[in-house]
Amino acid sequence: MNRILLGHGSGGKLMHELIKKYIAPIFDLPSLMDSAIVSLNHSGKVAITTDSYTVSPIFFPGGDIGDLAINGTVNDLAVVGATPLYLTVGFILEEGFPMEHFERVLNSISKAAKKAHIKIVAGDTKVVDKGKGDGIFINTSGIGIVPEGIELSAQKIEVGDKVIISGSIGNHGIAVMSERNGFTFEPPVLSDTRALNGIIAEVLNNFAPYVKIMRDPTRGGVATTLKELALEGNKDILLYEKEIPLLDTVKGACELLGLDPLYVANEGIFIAIVKADMAENIVELMRNHPFGKESAIIGEVISEGNKVLLKTQIGGTRIVDMLPGEQLPRIC
Amino acid sequence: MNRILLGHGSGGKLMHELIKKYIAPIFDLPSLMDSAIVSLNHSGKVAITTDSYTVSPIFFPGGDIGDLAINGTVNDLAVVGATPLYLTVGFILEEGFPMEHFERVLNSISKAAKKAHIKIVAGDTKVVDKGKGDGIFINTSGIGIVPEGIELSAQKIEVGDKVIISGSIGNHGIAVMSERNGFTFEPPVLSDTRALNGIIAEVLNNFAPYVKIMRDPTRGGVATTLKELALEGNKDILLYEKEIPLLDTVKGACELLGLDPLYVANEGIFIAIVKADMAENIVELMRNHPFGKESAIIGEVISEGNKVLLKTQIGGTRIVDMLPGEQLPRIC
């Protein structure tokens, strides 16, 4: 059994063998049932999210589609203030996909789930005929509980609030791009894929009343995410280019490829808009976390409106809009 | 905007337009956020499930990939005794997919969600390059609450219990197969795709203590589902071929195509194993529901073991195993 066959998605014997031999041991699923039953010792609010992962190539410097699928969904829950608890994983495999690659992805999933302290409770496997897919697509959906008193909202953004970022931008997009096109950088650019629920919990445990909203700037990058927040909160946001953490290699790669790092996808950082007088304290706390060493205040909310403005290194100011079309397809 | 472009999955402007114009109005999503926050007025057990839908062709007699994706996930929750509440929907679209088809699928999703009384609370859209997908794949994940006192389990199956089915078998598989291969039947065979949470709730509201376990016999058909139950419950199950509801057209189609209807996928029926002395009453109740008119007792649990046996029309008995390999790929 070295490659995925159509029969692995049939619901019959081959599929049961695949689940029993490869999937169940790694996931620690209790049975082959389609639905899992879990206890939610919480009668309040629950966060629900879903994301499909179609990144190409599936293996890239710093990660693969497996840990990306776990971390991405964990992060979507974490940034709305939820404690991620349970994830589901659905595979769409292409006939002929090497079993060795599938095992590697399953291992990444398993490791990432452990690191993020979440449980994978239900799964699904479909197989499509050769030429009708691309090796492997993964959907993960997740639920988490929102602790009492946490209510993040763009409506809470006020003029004067500061914009914080937890790490350097563009790493994930450039890592995938370099692998896809066979570029190498020295030192290599690694994807920042990682679960942010730990660092976000620390921020909320200590500073919840001062945090207005959080977002993870994935597809569309920091620019698109902040434009969304500007629109939702009806505020103008001013960014200081020189404060935005950016690795030299990523900067160089972006110049070479004609990309604006503000639009390049990230998978391991978050943006928070916070009350100004606590911004420094929050950044200090974040810098003490291994996933927040480069945290910085990168901008502020300057007025009512709906624009994002960038004060450039050389002193000019330009308007930052959403990514208009396509920059880097299949980045997550 | 007549076809899906890669930019529709970029996270940027095109994606926002797609969501705003096509997806959000139909789904009634509150915002563009990745995660939804909902209230679960229930501190007990929660059922979680996920399923990806890759059916080919996406439109078939009696349904399409849209209602299938809603009904299938609703049914996975319903058969474990849960009341389905919230679903997420993730699309993987292929570049070039006609917008007109996407709209048709979105409409089916919307209608099916209303009929099943569930809410779609979060969504995701990815686009893959032409030739790397197949028009549209859909993942739906769902959560539901399990009412107090409901605890279905194969461990509860006892010798003497009866096997009930809620409708005729093989309709979905034959409907998809006929569309795929350009066959027509007279009268046409329609997929049975429909949400079973209504009829199942009626059964449980009236007879919960007598219901041991339920399953929806989708991929792998009735044979595979019952074999799974025999293995999980450590019991031998005897089926009476003549009691199994089967439309003449489906029977004829199976003979023509060399298929065993016991292995053909269903999307709108369920199997229940119930206490013998209530079996007739349960069937009577089910027959009064529009989705259970053909309900019947089709077998019984005859001994400790792990086999499924079929008493054939002509009086012989044969062993029924799981679907060994692949029969009808991409049926759901």
Image (cartoon, coloured by chain):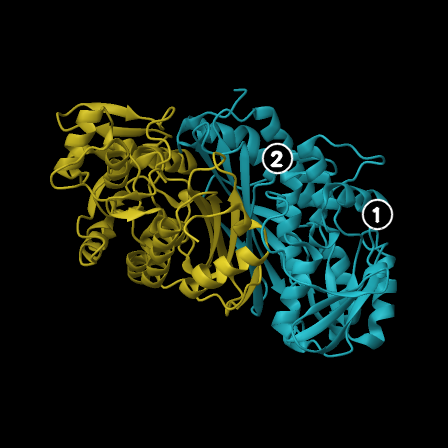
Chain colours: A cyan, B yellow
Q: Is residue A35 left or right of residue A300?
A: left
Task: Say above or below: A25 vs B28.
Answer: above
Residue A122 visible, this orientation? no
Q: Is residue A217 left or right of residue B67?
A: right
The amino acid beneath tag 2 is Leu
Residue depicted at 47% across the width and 37% down the height: B133
SS state under label 1: loop
Which residue is tagged 1?
A247
Q: Nearer the viewer, residue B193 or A192?
A: A192
Q: Nearer the viewer, residue B244 or B61?
A: B61
The amino acid beneath tag 1 is Leu
Give x and y (percent) for residue B95. Answer: 48, 42
Which residue is tagged 2?
A106
Q: Is residue A253 left or right of residue B231?
A: right
Instruction: Using the image, tell me which numbered label, if any, was put on residue A278.
Output: none
Q: Residue furthest top?
A: A1
Task: Say above or below: B104 vs B129.
Answer: below
Residue depicted at 45% across the width and 62% down the height: B21
